Image: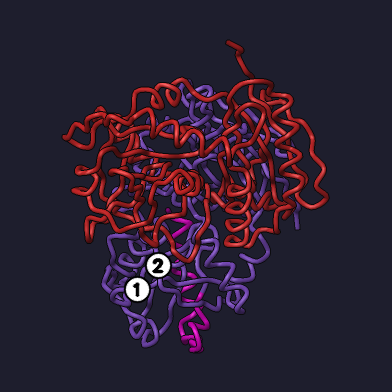
Chain colours: A red, B purple
């Protein structure tokens, strides 16, 4: 097994040139709004077999996020060039690629932009195989529906994840405190399987998932019937299987939901392969 | 007038040693949770006449924020030492000091901590003198009441501020969309004056303001009657004067609120001096 080092390429946000950055050296200045205000956006993209998986959907959401924050429109060509250069430097094997785009330094007014690739963590690899124990958590705060962007503001989500881990869980599924509707995972989209039906929660406070979108497109072509739907916790408990899908973890089956054990379905490997294939085709 | 350069001192989060950092060089690594997740806290502190104003309240809230995020308890002595060292390096005159404390790099697990001082911006200086035009904005999102911390997650607030500026305003006062109650400024606390009564909005989704607390303590000693109270917009319009108070801007009188012009009260200078004195004593 190859041990990979992280790779960084900085993207010049206007001209579009790229340059390699040593990951062992600091990158961001003290007055960057990414740091001082969390004023920036990101995408996490799976690198597999030398390819960025599901790249078109990520690029599209990235542009939507940038527009929502009033950042200059990303020069996608530069981001893709930087991603290619980073893949070459990173080498074979799976990686987690992150695009980050911030408003930049207060003193210069120029956005900061970079692409990184790092190895997939052992925790993520294990969760793909073994599934995850999930804590249900009412989300007491709400996201700004006026800001449909994948921002860097995850402090509250991280706090909930820490609480979950203290209690012996691996992850979180948020529910709406008013009506109990299922929202999303901490950094993933919820997908249920019941017979040939794939469902994902409908709610206007959650950001559309790129992996879930790729999955639904592929699954439809394989004869599954897919749709968004308002879902409550009982619906999760009654499903054949419940999955957290996201770009780098791809799919982790929920094997415990709060106090309930969720048995592995007969078609666990089939579903996992379906999600895997959706990512590879994306 | 002296032109000041920014000053940075890095705080070693466990041992407590401090070291100078060149502000013209990058400080933060690509995998710092401050950048990737906004997972950190801060305080902004006014530096005036070589002193950190209202330091005790800032230090206290800093510790509360750190506890809420499960960060190691700050070694306050180190933060104060770094602040002193930065003040000496910065020299005479007013400055804005920021304490930032993040969960640190994913690859090391060690928190990142630093103190900076920079000149007060011309915009802030002008707003102290001339007051501010304020847009009213329903806050469509809510803060996590389970996370009573001054985190780095200000992307949505910044988006609202940008919108306000596009519309010819300088700042924002948020209201609760459900009941119309007044909440807070974008980065400040709302205070009203009516006769000898000072009021600030009561709501459990807003973080207590350090400047407002210092003001109320001082104003009480000067014969004013101060309290928190549920306030609506009509209450603001009927007040003698409305102020946005915060550590570095200190006090900016609201001279326009939405479409309404708010006339300067007879005691404008008296109130400004009162707030000013509260900061100097803190």
| SS for dot 2 | loop
Quadrant of the rendered image containing residue B75: top left
Residue B140 image label: 2
Position of residue B121 measured from the top left corner of the image (x, y, whole percent) = 66, 60
Residue labelled with disc 1: B177
From which residue to which does the magenta span run?
B253-282
**Front residue of B266 and A158:** A158
Left or right of A18, for residue B179: left
Disc 1 element: loop
- Mark carried by residue A254: none
Position of residue A36 measured from the top left corner of the image (x, y, whole percent): 56, 48
> Please, which chain is the residue tagged with disc 2 on?
B
| Circles 1 and 2 in contact, beta carbons < 8 Å | yes
Q: Identify which residue is drawn at 79% across, 35% down.
A: A19
> For this rendering, which residue is in front, B185 or A46?
A46
- Residue drawn at (17%, 35%) of the image: A260
Give the residue displayed 34% in from the left and 69% down from the top: B222
The chain letter for the residue carrying disc 1 is B
Q: In this view, does A133 lie above or below B272?
A: above
Residue B142 location, quadrant: bottom left
One can see residue B211 in this view: yes
Q: Is residue B60 visible?
A: no
Residue A43: x and y in percent read 57, 44
**In the visual, does B178 lie left or right of A226?**
left
Position of B223 relative to B143 (above/below): below
Q: Is residue A175 magenta?
A: no
Classed neighbour count for the residue bearing mark 2: other residues with Cα under 10 Å, few (<14), some (14–19), many (≥20):
some
**Label whose residue precedes the other's in the sequence (1 or 2):** 2
């Amino acid at each position: 097994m190859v041990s990979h080092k992280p790779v960084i390429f900085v993207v010049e946000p206007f001209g579009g040139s790229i340059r390699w950055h040593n990951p062992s050296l600091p990158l961001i200045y003290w007055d960057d709004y990414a740091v001082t205000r969390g004023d920036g956006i990101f995408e996490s993209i799976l690198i597999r077999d030398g390819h960025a998986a599901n790249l078109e959907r990520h690029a599209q959401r990235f542009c939507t996020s940038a527009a929502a924050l009033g950042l200059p429109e990303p020069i996608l060509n530069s981001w893709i060039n930087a991603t290619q250069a980073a893949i070459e430097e990173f080498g074979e094997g799976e990686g987690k690629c992150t695009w980050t785009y911030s408003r930049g330094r207060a003193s210069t007014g120029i956005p900061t932009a970079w692409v990184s690739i790092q190895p997939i963590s052992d925790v993520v690899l294990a969760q793909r195989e073994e599934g995850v124990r999930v804590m249900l958590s009412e989300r007491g705060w709400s996201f700004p529906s006026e800001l449909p962007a994948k921002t860097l503001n995850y402090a509250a989500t991280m706090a909930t994840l820490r609480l979950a881990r203290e209690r012996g869980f691996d992850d979180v599924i948020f529910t709406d405190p008013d009506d109990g509707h299922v929202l999303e995972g901490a950094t993933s989209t919820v997908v249920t399987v019941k017979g040939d039906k794939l469902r994902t929660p409908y709610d206007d406070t959650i950001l559309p998932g790129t992996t879930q979108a790729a999955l639904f497109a592929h699954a439809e072509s394989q004869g599954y019937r897919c749709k968004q739907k308002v879902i409550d916790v009982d619906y999760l408990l009654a499903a054949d299987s419940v999955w957290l899908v996201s770009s780098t973890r791809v799919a982790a089956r929920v094997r415990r939901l709060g106090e309930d054990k969720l048995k592995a379905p007969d078609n666990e490997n089939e579903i996992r392969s379906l999600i895997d294939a959706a990512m590879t085709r994306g």
